[in-house]
Image: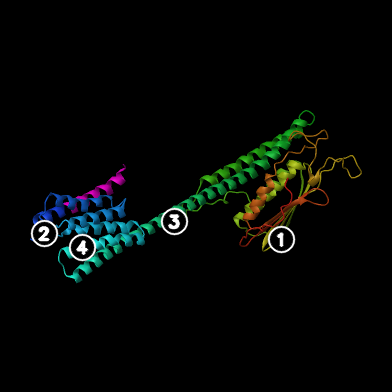
Amino acid sequence: MSLPRLRPLAVDSAVALGFAAVGCIAGAYYQPPGWRAFDGPGYVLACLTALPLVARRRFPLPAVLASAAGYAVYLGCGYQPSVNFWAPAVALLSLAGRRPLGVALAGAVPVVAVIVLSGVSGRLHPALTAAQALLVPVVAIAFGHTRHLLVRANARLRDVTAELVAEQEERARDAVTLERMAIARELHDVVAHHMSVITIQAGLAETVLTSDVPMARKALGHIALTGREALDELRRLLTVLRVRSDDDGQGTPYGAAPRLDRLPDLISGATAAGLDVRFTARGEPGPLPPVVDVCAYRVVQEALTNVIKHAPGARVALTVDHTPDEVVLVVRNDAVRDGGGPDGSDGRAGRGGRAAHGGRAGRTRTDGRPETVPGTGLGLIGMRERVKICGGRLSAAPHDGGGFEVVAVLPLRASRHASPGEPEGQER
């Protein structure tokens, strides 16, 4: 038996022994004439009246019945009334504290009966007998039922507390999951773009290593530069993950991330990878919210990365339109066309500007143009998630003239959730 159970049992045992001792002492030293002398059976019946209190917590109703029965037999044997009738009253108090009110009222019936029997045996005035027969059970039930209500309220409070703790833990797990997703998006954007450029340049360098040494040297230089840029962005990302503000307790998740003012570097890297990028800026650039600034850069970066992977050597039109209410990004690439037909197409350019032929990623074809790199479709998913966080809209789909077009609209004011019915476009 555990210690928490031993302690209430010890208390109840002490209470029962105390009532038994008091009853025996009262019977032994208070022996008025007219009643049976307090002898051995009297001691036994006094103990039988009090000892059921040992089980008043676990079996409250049987304890009431047993105690009341013991006292009724005690009075029936002709012994003088004494303090013994308080044992059934205490048992009734415990019953009201652990069982519903209806059960407590049922248990009060034998207690009222033995109190009335005690008053009649003691030749008390009928009014006094009725008063004590009414007041003692009512007070016991009132105190006991109040305790019963408090126990139930505490149990409900514990349940609510447990639910709140579980909800808080669930929210903490969701927050960790969202943070991991954000980190995964950042790592994808950093690694995918730079590794795509490095892969294309490495394939070009391998192809022209013996035939065009200056071109190979230039490609290797681009590889080194792109690798350094990737390392710089990864360092900035790790810094954001490690450092937190000591002044206000809030992190600065966008402080070290690249923004739109670094578009020239991004375009330069894409041009080095073989793209023909034509950049157009419209409107008057103004200060952007950090989350929108980072999102715009990442959308352009991912769109150019997709073109490098799926349509190497294509012409790309990049437009950034600044308005007072939003920033509109348009990245549109033409289909890659090879010689062989009247329009320069030999059928190898797939839908959306994707080359339909296979081959090892990063190598070049016999005509000196880089091969396409297989994609997973995660790039557009990441872009769409970023744009939704900003409350914007994203469409990504092939356009009629061949090639692919990505359009992102990022509001500058209070963000809203993207509409569930917005077109998903086509992922590549």
Asked if residue 236 lies left or right of residue 17, the reply is right
Determine crowd level at label 2: few under 14, some 14-19, many 20+ residues with C-alpha closer than 10 A: some
Q: Which of 352 and 105 lies nearest the eye of the viewer?
A: 105
Distance from label 3 to label 4 (Cα)? 47 Å
The amino acid beneath tag 2 is: Trp
Instruction: Left or right? Give the position of 289 relative to 35.
Output: right
User: Mark 3 = which residue?
Assistant: 160
- Describe the element under mark 1 as helix, strand or loop: loop
Q: Can you identify the residue that label 4 sits on?
A: 117
Which numbered disc covers residue 35?
A: 2
Label 1 Cα neighbours within 10 Å, binned few <14 / some 14-19 / many ≥20: few
- Alpha carbon of mark 2 to alpha carbon of mark 1: how far? 112 Å
Instruction: Tell me which label, 2 or 1, sits earlier in the chain.
Output: 2
Outermost residue, right direction? 342
Q: Give the magenta-colored segment's residue range.
A: 1-20
| Quadrant in which the C terminus appears | top right
Res 328 → quadrant: bottom right
Q: Which residue is mark 1?
A: 283
Side of 19 where 371 appears, left or right: right
- Residue 341 at x, y = what percent? 91, 42
In the image, what residue occupies the spot 9% across and 61% down? 34
